[in-house]
Image (cartoon, grey):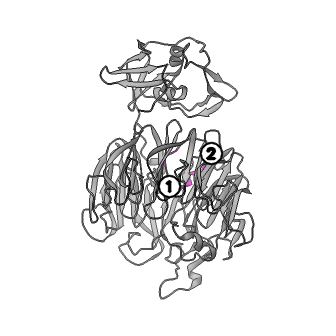
Amino acid sequence: MGGSIKYLKNGLGKIMEGFKVNRITTTKIVARRRNTMKKKMLSIMLVMALCATFAPNVAASTTVSKEAVALSTLTAAITASGDLYCWGTNTSGQLGIGDREESGFTPVKVLSNVASVTTDNTNVAAITTNGDLYCWGGNEFGQVGNGESGRYMRQSTPVKVLSKVVSVTMENGTIGAITTNGDLYMWGRNVYGQVGNGKGGEGESLATPVKVLSNVESIMMDEYRMSNVTTLAITRNGDLYAWGYNEHGQVGNGKSGTGAYQTTPVKVLSNVASLTANDGPAAAITNNGDLYCWGINLFGQVGNGSSRDNQTTPVKVLSDVVSVTTSQTTVAITENGDLYAWGYNEMGQVGNGMEAYSQDSQTTPVKVLSNVVSVTSSITNTAAITTSGDLYSWGENGYGQIGNGATKVQTSPVKVLSNVASFTTDNGATAAAITTNGDLYCWGYNNEGQVGNNKSKGEETGTLMDERQTTPVKVLSNVVSAIIDGHVAASVTQNGDLYCWGYNFDYQVGNGLRTNQLTPFKALTGIRLAASAPSVPAITATPTASKVLVDGENVSFDAYNIAGNNYFKLRDLAYIMNGSLKQFSVSWDSVNNAISLQSGQAYRTVGGEMAKKGTAATTPIPTTSKIILDGKIVSLTAYNIAGNNYFKLRDVGSAFDFNVSWNGLLQTIEIDSTGSYTLD
């Protein structure tokens, strides 16, 4: 099994040393906003909004999402009632069933009230509906987080590690979790400083969670070679921090080299809306749509016009970008739906029509397709869905994974299917698409029966033709989601049935057998569907009881505490700061339908400022209004309470550079208009 692609050949061998090939990235057109990371399982919800905007995937790391099924060397699934079932390999205790059997042959219940789950080959992490994080499995590097570590250590039952967790990410023994108030905790393997606690070096690890950063919105971890992990995080005000492995400049701090790893978070970029990195360069889209890339550039995948030379700081590559995916080829979608690609192109994966094997590098973006709503890429292949639902594919085709009936490299986009809602692929080798009416089609590499067409090459029977499915074949109906990983396929139907098929040496199919499953097998029923996923617990806004001093004077604000942070009326802050060096104006921009802020300008009162403080807890509603500061779109965390917008005090302090601090002795919030903002 594993992540190897046996058909890789010719020039690809030049880049395979040091690169994993068991990942894909998928991205969809996005209304620019930061988003937590998602697993590569795609929902048929795209059917309802092919022409709308979507949140981007940040797909390098295995990350918690609202999806109910996860695949690795084991399978994990959450039912509608919140029960978590696991089955498959158990060599490191990753099934969580408390025994030392090598495998679990059929689904077994492990945990209740589970909201989300993520897995890798040796570990599992699950977040419950009340925000408790449980981890189990291999513990050589302390990645379980229970304070223990050692070469043969394992945790064979779930152990609670943290509370109030909203997301968790894991990458080859390193784990990061974000809490409700935005605190980022890291632990586990730390050879290259990827934990971010100021340490690193051979054998370095951390067995308990340590707080690394505050006000974090999302993180991702990108691995280059085994254990060489770079961690990147976006804060709630759009600052991008990076740390960890930095041989090719992937941290973005202007340094590179095997000994140049960064052991603490360093700020790399501001006003970042989304981020991705996937065994290639890092790529970030800012709030105004500028795309910046940096890191490894062996084949021009940074897009700065050169190749072979690493890019150690972010460089602007494109404007008006809404989504991007990276591997050895980088692909981006602009606001008008144009698809641009650049980077590694020996097998036509850029899609610019160049003869196969004649050009290994495209060093600047080239337009490939129009009217695109989503794109999926791997190290060898690219596929895109247009606004009309047409699926186009191009790149390596040795096993018919393009789906055009041939096995010749495809150097430009070719239409494969119509009325497609979603698409996914296993390493670019086996492809799967769900149509708008819920039919699941599969094609491509079929050595273990993962296409589901009742064929496979097999070890003694079967032919090379059985190993190839060169056109899409219908496998299931009424499907809402599908995933293929490591030659194992899984799909959930509209009534919540989970079907698995393909590679089964580690019992991942769940049928109790140890032979490959050549057709879909119903492994579990009652799987949680997207519409029935547990909602985030209601947020409560409690009137802030703390005293507030502004430049040493007591001021009574109408303010609320939400998830451990203080939120103030924006106009109240502007009113109080008026006349100071940090004054700012607040107005409504009717042309752009946005809240307009201008630093250094006097505030004009509109009435209602400094109203009486609230006395009761209430439920706030996230503010969706666009915010423009000094002519640029910015991201500030805000809630609407009783018709008024309340902004996080620290976000406003950071935006206008006035200091905000907490005096623990006096239990007082202190605002200093003469000082500069500092992050506690």
Which residue is at the far bottom? 460
How many numbered discs, if any? 2
Residue nearer the viewer, 383 or 138: 138
Which type of secondary structure does the marked residue at label 1 adopt? loop
Which type of secondary structure does the marked residue at label 2 adopt? loop
Q: Amino acid at mark 1?
A: Asn
Image x and y of residue 650, in percent: 46, 28
Q: Quadrant of residue 626?
A: top right
Residue nearer the viewer, 647 or 424: 647
Residue 324's mark? none
Image x and y of residue 310, in percent: 60, 57
Look at the picture and state if 178 lies above or below 16: above
- Residue at 31 percent across and 61 percent down: it is 140
Dot 2 corresponds to which residue?
53
Q: Quadrant of residue 510?
A: bottom left
Residue 246's mark? 1
Q: Which residues are magenta?
A: 35-49
Which dot, 1 or 2, sits closer to the camera? 1
- State yes or no: residue 361 in magenta: no
Q: If the image is split into quadrants, where does the N terminus sit?
A: bottom left
Image x and y of residue 148, in percent: 25, 55
Of the image marks 1 and 2, the number of the one nearer the N terminus:
2
